Amino acid sequence: MGNTPSGRNEWALVLGGSSGFGLATAHKLSEHGLNICVVHRDRRGAMSRIEPEFEKIRERGVALVTFNQDALSDESRGEILDDLAQRLESGGGRIRLLLHSIAFGNLKLIGPEAPSKSAARATLARELDIEEERLAEVVDRSFAEGVDGVQGLTSPPGYAQDLFLEDEDMVRTIYAMGTSLLTWTQDVLGRGLFADDARVLGMTSEGNEVAWKGYAAVAAAKVALESVSRSIAVEMAHFGIRSNIVQAGVTDTPALRLIPGNDHLKAQARTRNPFGRLTTPEDVANVIYLLSLPEAAWINGAIIRVDGGEHISGLSR
């Protein structure tokens, strides 16, 4: 594969590669000649959407191996890496890039919410001399139709008020979206499958330092992910591994749509972003490709924001 980042027969192993950042990255890297191994967990009904995407990757002339298995299972991980090791051995290939893009987390609140009422909406209704319920109807409809800037006046997002975050929820989420990065990295390294100049990448979000309702477990997982990545960057550098974390801006992915209040998050991001739009999976995939290049070898242990300036923009446009 002469157009791979290093010019050799190399692979990208994408954990969570059937949608969002993982799928966009698989497409981008395959365009540049990397062979792709995708690990995903999807129901049979979803495959009618996913298989055409995989076929596009195959049409680029690269090898594509997919495993519809649980990436968090020790048994599945062993089976996947055994299979992949045989393929790499027969072709003399190595894993250039390991991307951890697993989205499997709990989105429960940590406790009951306080009663919520919009003081701004009540004041506006009083000044306009209309019933607050009527104003709420108009604002909610406008917001649903894509009008940004009114999210502060809308009815609040709904959260389950009878199920709250428990220890097991937290433990599973932290492993799934955080420390499993280390588990996979150790196993790939132990089998000697990494290239001499390998890249390990994970995905984080602004929830790593901002408290979003219902995001406590995922936020904890992202912080753990970042810590693990820094340790990999230091302790595995002598194996040629560079480890970094990509912090994407708010992106309309299937994972984001599971978060209660995601419409509000998207509206706030569009209003705040200097470019007036959300981050796309392709924006993120482009940067992941750049990080796979030899010229990016001195980037190690970093958190790299890919958000068009969303994070640093303190004022609305």
Image (cartoon, rainbow, N blue to C red):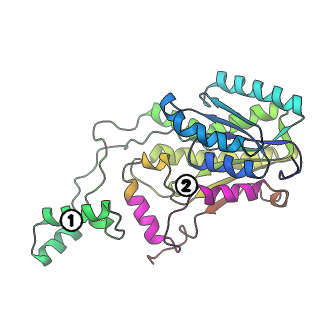
Residue for point 70% across, 55% down: 288
Whether residue 91 is situated above or below residue 290 in the rendered picture: above
- The quarter of the picture where the C terminus appears is bottom left
> Can you tell which of label 2 and label 1 is closer to the viewer?
1
Q: How many marks?
A: 2
Residue 269 is inside the magenta segment = yes
Instruction: Identify residue type, mark 1.
Output: Val
Left or right, residue 281 beside residue 217: right
Residue for point 41% across, 48% down: 259
Which numbered tag is attached to residue 205? Answer: 2
Residue 268 is inside the magenta segment = yes
Instruction: Identify residue type, mark 2.
Output: Ser
Which numbered tag is attached to residue 304? Answer: none
Most extreme residue toward the front is 59
- The segment highlighted magenta reads 264-292
Q: Main secondary structure of the magenta part?
A: helix
Q: Position of residue 302 (x, y in %)?
A: 70, 57
Other-residue count near label 1 (Cα within 10 Å), few / some / many at <14 / 14–19 / ≥20: few
Whether residue 90 is situated above or below residue 177 in the rendered picture: above
Label 2: state its secondary structure: loop
Q: What residue did someone put label 1 on?
A: 138
Quadrant position of residue 73? top right
Left or right, residue 297 beside residue 105: right
Label 1: state its secondary structure: helix
Quadrant position of residue 194? top right
Residue for point 42% across, 54% down: 212
Q: Position of residue 213 (x, y in %)?
A: 39, 51
Q: CA distance from mark 2 to mark 1?
A: 32 Å
Q: Position of residue 155 (x, y in %)?
A: 25, 58
